Amino acid sequence: MFKFLKFGRGSKSKVVIETQRQTFERLVGELNEAIAALPDMPAVTVNPVTNEISFALPDTFPDEALALPAPEPEPEGEVVEGAEAVEESTEAKVVEDKNATAA
């Protein structure tokens, strides 16, 4: 009836510690699987001086292409609608503040 109370008392599984070789082989295998799944193969560069591996990745991955497109940035040279009204109201407030401090 109260079997749920004995839940944590069972035999515990042993933790398996990976050697550095096993870890490296697992990582290389996972990396190869991920690269093989890509439609466009990235260029791989190995730098023997720093022992680094780098990849020339595409601009977008297939799963990123399914997301909504990024908004396009507005050109800096254009005047935004309503900007003149904001400038006029700002000038009116400055004139009112000057008149209030002069009085």
Image (cartoon, grey):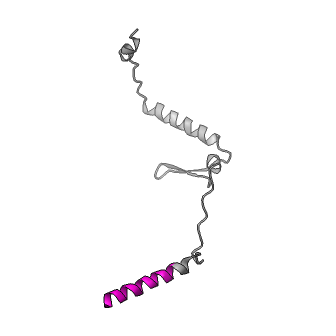
**On screen, 62 above or below 82?**
above
> Is 70 situated left or right of 48 in this image?
right
Residue 62 in picture, x, y percent from top left = 65, 47
Q: Quadrant of the N terminus?
A: top left
91 is within the stretch colored magenta: yes
Q: Residue furthest right?
A: 39
**On screen, 46 above or below 85?**
above
Q: Quadrant of the C terminus?
A: bottom left
Q: Residue furthest bottom?
A: 102
59 is within the stretch colored magenta: no
Residue 96 in picture, x, y percent from top left = 40, 85
Image quadrant of residue 97? bottom left
72 and 23: which is toward the camera: 72
Which residue appears at 50% of the width and 83% of the height?
88
Residue 49 in picture, x, y percent from top left = 47, 53
Which residue appears at 60% of the width and 58% of the height?
70
Image quadrant of residue 99? bottom left
Residue numbers of the magenta segment: 86-103
The main secondary structure of the magenta stretch is helix
Which residue appears at 65% of the width and 44% of the height?
38
Which residue appears at 40% of the width and 15% of the height?
4
**On screen, 100 above or below 58?**
below
17 and 71: which is toward the camera: 71
Residue 78 in picture, x, y percent from top left = 60, 77
Q: Residue furthest top?
A: 1
Q: Looking at the image, how many numbered discs can be counted on the residues? A: 0
